[in-house]
Image (spheres, grey):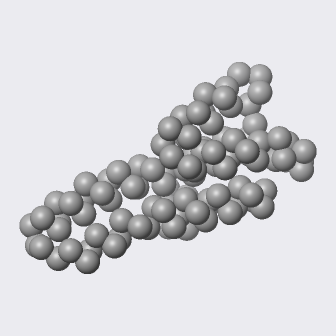
Amino acid sequence: MDQTTKEAGKTMAIISYVTLIGTLIAYFSNQGDKKNEFVSFHIGQSLRVWILAIVLNILLRVVVSITGIGFLSLISFLPLVLAILGIMNAMNLKEEPVPVIGTIGG
């Protein structure tokens, strides 16, 4: 993939990590004849991050409510860290998977 294709999709790649709504906006704006592979890669990565965030949030609420160990809630910051790493990759025009979950389902 050439540099101009990546530059053209840089903004949408970054938006895909901002929120789950941003992922949907990037997905629907990347359809049809304007499809950009760089954006598609980052949409897939951000979708993995947001699915992890939802599942982790549910699991942590159950575990913390049963055990009462509140500091486990700090694990919920993991998706935020992964999203920031994804944004940094998109800003630097890299197609590197996010750590831990980037290659799942890939």
Relative horizontal placement of residue 1, taking residue 101 as reference (left or right): right
| Corner quadrant of residue 62 | bottom left
Which residue occupies the foreground of this view, 37 or 22? 22
Q: Is residue 98 visible to us here? A: no
Relative horizontal placement of residue 54, taking residue 26 as reference (left or right): left
Which residue occupies the foreground of this view, 33 or 15? 15
| Corner quadrant of residue 74 | bottom left
Q: Residue at x 39, y 55 (%)?
A: 53
Relative horizontal placement of residue 36, taking residue 15 as reference (left or right): right
Q: Residue at x 17, y 68 (%)?
A: 64
Q: Which residue is drawn at 21% across and 60% down?
A: 61
Query: Residue 87 location in percent, x, y?
Result: 64, 58
Residue closest to the far top: 32
Relative horizontal placement of residue 3, taking residue 98 as reference (left or right): right
Residue closest to the far left: 66
- Please tell me how many numbered marks the rendered image carries: 0
Query: Residue 59 location in percent, x, y?
Result: 24, 59
Q: Is residue 59 visible to us here? A: yes
Query: Residue 93 location in percent, x, y?
Result: 78, 56
